[in-house]
Image (cartoon, grey):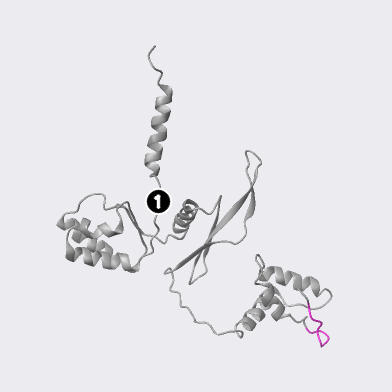
Amino acid sequence: MRAVQPAVRGQRAPIDLASMHRELRRKGMTLLLLWQEYVQASAGLPTYQYTQFCQNYHAYAGTLRRSMRQVHRAGEKLFIDYAGQTVPLVDPDTGELRRAHIFIAVLGASNYTYACATPRETQVDWLRGLSQAFAFFGGVREILDDWAMTPLDQTARHDLLEVIDDRTRKSTVITSQLPIDHWHAWLNDPIVADAILDRLVHRSHRISLKGELLICAHQAITLAALRSQVRPDR
């Protein structure tokens, strides 16, 4: 980053904010790195501290374009993604060098952040990182596992409606092997089914998983191992 010579003796070295804004578009570039370059390029001159450096940039960036202000309520939204760059990770047993992918989850209101390393960016890695983030934040208080595995009687349907109604504005995770298109028929009560699905389906984020169930794969591996230990009679 290029520093500009101060016009007045004793004045802090000016910041090339336009150049700084362009540099931040580069992958891996951060305000901290730009500040360090600014200090090095301004050797012998008074410089801005990191906090003031950032304040100057944010004030400049705020004049470039208008944007819609987003209001985040505490605990309402969690933003998740993978960082653009990987980091080196050494296997302590083999010494093999691998590239770890960094999963990041950030709460919108507080910027409270969780991060973890995963071996890849597959769906399994994504869901594992998300579940660990939920555990870290304590953000999911209700999990309905194996939804629609058994029939419900009238009392159970109304109890379920009360639970779903109470969770309308709260975080809830539902897992099911039954396709969503079949949920209405499974509930077996048009009025209650409409009420429950109206609260669930239209306000949710869906993640569809495909492939063999892990429990089935585990059973198949166990059965194959047992068969390999059985010797035929001679």
Quadrant, the C terminus: top left
User: Residue 131 appears at what percent x and percent y?
Assistant: 44, 55
Q: Secondary structure at mark 1?
A: loop
Kindly identify the residue that appears in the image at 83 percent across and 86 percent down: 9
Mark 1 residue type: Lys
Query: For this rendering, which residue is in front, 140 or 26?
Result: 26
Q: Is residue 8 magenta?
A: yes
Residue 153 x/y as whole percent: 16, 54
Q: 77 left or right of 182?
A: right
Can residue 167 be seen here? Answer: no
Q: Which residue is mark 1?
A: 210
Q: Residues within 10 Å of mark 1 (few under 14, many from 20)?
A: few
Residue 38 is inside the magenta segment: no
Which residue is situated farthest in the bottom direction here? 8
Would residue 39 be found to the left or right of residue 168 on screen?
Answer: right
Q: Nearer the viewer, residue 96 or 167?
A: 96
Judged from this view, the residue extending furthest toward the top is: 234
Magenta segment's dominant SS is: loop
Q: Position of residue 88 (x, y in %)?
A: 65, 51
* Image quadrant in which the N terminus is located: bottom right
Quarter of image, res 12 = bottom right
Q: How many marks?
A: 1
Q: Is residue 49 above or below residue 123?
A: below
Seen at 40% across and 32% down, the residue is 222
Which image quarter: residue 156? Answer: bottom left
Q: Residue at x 40, y 39 (%)?
A: 217
Side of 53 where 119 appears, left or right = left
| Start-end of magenta stretch | 3-11
Q: x, y (%) of residue 87? A: 64, 54
Q: Note whether 87 is above or below 225 in the view shown.
A: below
Q: Is residue 204 visible?
A: yes
